[in-house]
Image (cartoon, rainbow, N blue to C red):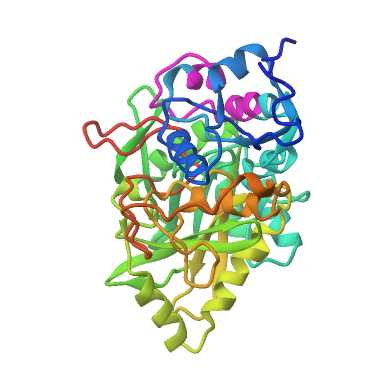
Amino acid sequence: MRHTAVETPEASATPGAPPRFAVVGNPENRRVGLFTTAVRAAGLPAPRVLAWRDVLREGGAVFAPGEYVRIDSPGENPEVDRLLRGPGEPTRVEGTARWYARFTAAVRGLSGGRPLDDPEELAVLFDKRRCHGVLHAAGVPVPESPTSGPDGVPVRGWADVRTLMRERRMPRLFVKLAHGSSASGVLAVESAGGGRIRATTSVELAPDGRLFNSLRVRRYTTEREVAAVVDALAPDGVHLERWLPKAGQRGRAADLRVVVVAGRATHAVVRTSRHPMTNLHLGGARGDLAAARAAVESAGADWGEALALCERAAACFPGTLCVGVDLLPALGWRRFTVGEVNAFGDLLPGLTGLPGSGAEGLDTYGAQIAAVIRGEGAGGLGSHARPPVPATAATGDDSGTGTGDGSDDRTDHSSEEDHRAPV
């Protein structure tokens, strides 16, 4: 196995030298650009960028002893997608099990430096069954699931889903790819009167049985169609969750993405939709964060406790500096459950920190740099850095200008030119 060598292995370890960051990512990607901007704003040298295509081809990479290593999303790059999932159309749904195996192997092939993302925790975060089980074992409220944790039931196809719906009394549930993201392969399934089945999803079922991601949410109204989609998903691994009714805002279903940095909830957005999935690329829209907080407090609940729940979820992954927590408010805004924890959940361009979070005036990337400067996460950076400057064009609320929904997406769903979208 070959490894990408560090060009100046002693640079970060030399006494008196400025601390350095390194990023494993796609150099052309907006995520890498936003993080680079945040590092420079802190008065630090631009991070060294190692391209995912090189890491995957070389079988790993070696970092200098003092380098702070950020692992970023390998998404939005067709060449990297082929290396992870194999050849095929980038809009296809299938291949996530292969993606997961190759991604986690590549992450484990990184050595040296001071990682800001723990490889074993990433392996859990990218398996919805394991992540759900870890949260449940820690006492974090999550939707009921028959497939999570060490006692999870394997799903081999639609027949198993049908059986579990009946045995667990789940007339409404979500079917999710175990290693999926950005609502790829997600179906909101419900049984209607007379045993009829229907599902809402962005998955497009082609005449030849192949599945494609789409920017258009559709509804399958026959059990035959739903069964065909689930049977095609099952070989990659499937996770099931009870479909909980969510609170609404202006007549639309609502949930929240809360970014937790070094154990502290720093940023939050409300996402609303006419569909069960609130992802922005599927027609979801930013909601009103102030109104959501007011609804929580009017219901007699504690907004601080809602944020603390996200921090409890993030605490299950202490070796990972930053995660994005999907917080599901129940009808009435009094109770909350955690839907998912996302490893790459910080893509919220222009959004600044919550009041009292310590990240006021900073975007999600600036907040992470500031946390490391303070000695949190992977350790302090010392006196070479200055406090990051506030993000430009930032709003301080949930009205960020980016097209991404903050999920751990692997490719760009923001284009509206084609109804089919890459996974």
Where in the figure is residue 39, as x and y percent of width and height?
52, 41
The answer to which image quadrant residue 50 occupies is top right
Numbered marks: total: 0
Where in the figure is residue 402, as x and y percent of width and height?
33, 47
Of residues 268 and 326, the one nearer the viewer is 268
Where in the figure is residue 83, as x and y percent of width and height?
54, 16
Q: Left of 37 or right of it: where is 282?
A: left
> Magenta span has 99?
yes
> Magenta span has 204?
no
Q: Give the range drawn in magenta.
A: 80-103
Mark yes or no: residue 104 visible.
yes
Q: Left of 296 or right of it: where is 135?
A: right
Residue sitting at x 72%, y 46%: 378
Of residues 230 and 132, the one nearer the viewer is 132
Q: Going by the picture, which residue comes out furthest to the left?
A: 417
The answer to which image quadrant residue 19 occupies is top right
Mark yes or no: residue 142 visible.
no
Q: Going by the picture, which residue comes out furthest to the top?
A: 2
Residue sitting at x 52%, y 32%: 46
